[in-house]
Image (cartoon, rainbow, N blue to C red):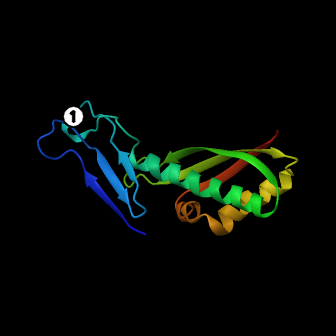
Amino acid sequence: MECTVSWTGAAGTRSSMGFVAETGSGHVLAMDGAPDAAKPENGGQNLAPRPMETVLAGTGGCTAYDVVLILKRGRHDVRGCSVRLTSERAATEPKVFTKIHMHFTVTGKELAPTAVERAIALSHEKYCSASIMLAKTAEITTSFDVVEV
C-alpha cells in the first residue's frame, strides 16, 4: 500500500495548510488545517477534513466494512450499516486519540442482535487493522442498535 501526500499551500499562497493525498489505488483525498486567528500563516482555510478526522473516518470505514461483510457471509439480511465515532485526544503533543466510542446502527430483516454484536467484536478483535492499531493508545468502546426494515 502506498500514498503520496503533497502540500497545496506552496508557491506564495497567503495562508494554507492544505494537503492532497494521492492513494495507490488512484484516488485523491483533500485535507486542511483549522484556521489560526493568532498566526494565520500557520493555519488552514477549513476547506477539507483535518488529517486526524480522516484517521477517524478511515477507522469507521474499516470497521463498518468488516461488520457488513461478516453479516453477509453469515447469510444475514443486512440492508444498511452506519457507525458514529466520537473521540477524545490527549491535551499535549502528540495529541493521540485516548478514547474512541463507536455506535453502530445496523438495519436489516430479522437481524439477530447477537449476530451484530459478534460481527462488531470480530472486527475489533481480529479484522479491523485501523481500530486494532488505534487501540494501542485509545480505549475503544462500542454500542449498537438494530433496526428492522
Name of the residue lying farthest toward the front: 26
User: Which residue is the site of mark 1?
Assistant: 40
Within the image, what quadrant is residue 33 found in? top left
- Figure disc tally: 1
User: In the image, 46: left or right of 83?
Assistant: left
In the picture, the quarter occupied by the C terminus is top right
Dot 1 lies on which element? helix
Q: In percent of the image, x 55 and y 56: which residue is there?
A: 138
Name of the residue lying farthest toward the left: 12
Name of the residue lying farthest toward the top: 37
User: In the image, 122: left or right of 84?
Assistant: right
Q: In percent of the image, x 39 and y 44: which residue is there?
A: 50
Q: In percent of the image, x 55 and y 45: which residue is there?
A: 87
Q: Position of residue 51 (x, y in %)?
A: 39, 49
User: In the image, 70: left or right of 127?
Assistant: right
Q: Position of residue 42 (x, y in %)?
A: 22, 41
Q: Position of residue 114 (x, y in %)?
A: 85, 55
Q: Is 74 in front, or is 13?
A: 74
Q: Is residue 50 depicted above or below 141 in this figure? A: above
Q: Position of residue 108 (x, y in %)?
A: 80, 45
Q: Is residue 140 depicted above or below 46 in this figure? A: below
User: In the image, 141: left or right of 75?
Assistant: left
Q: Is 105 in front, or is 110?
A: 110
In the picture, the quarter occupied by the N terminus is bottom left
| Type of amino acid under label 1 | Pro
Disc 1 crowd rating (10 Å Cα; few below 14, some 14-19, many 20+) is some
Q: In percent of the image, x 23 and y 32: which residue is there?
A: 38
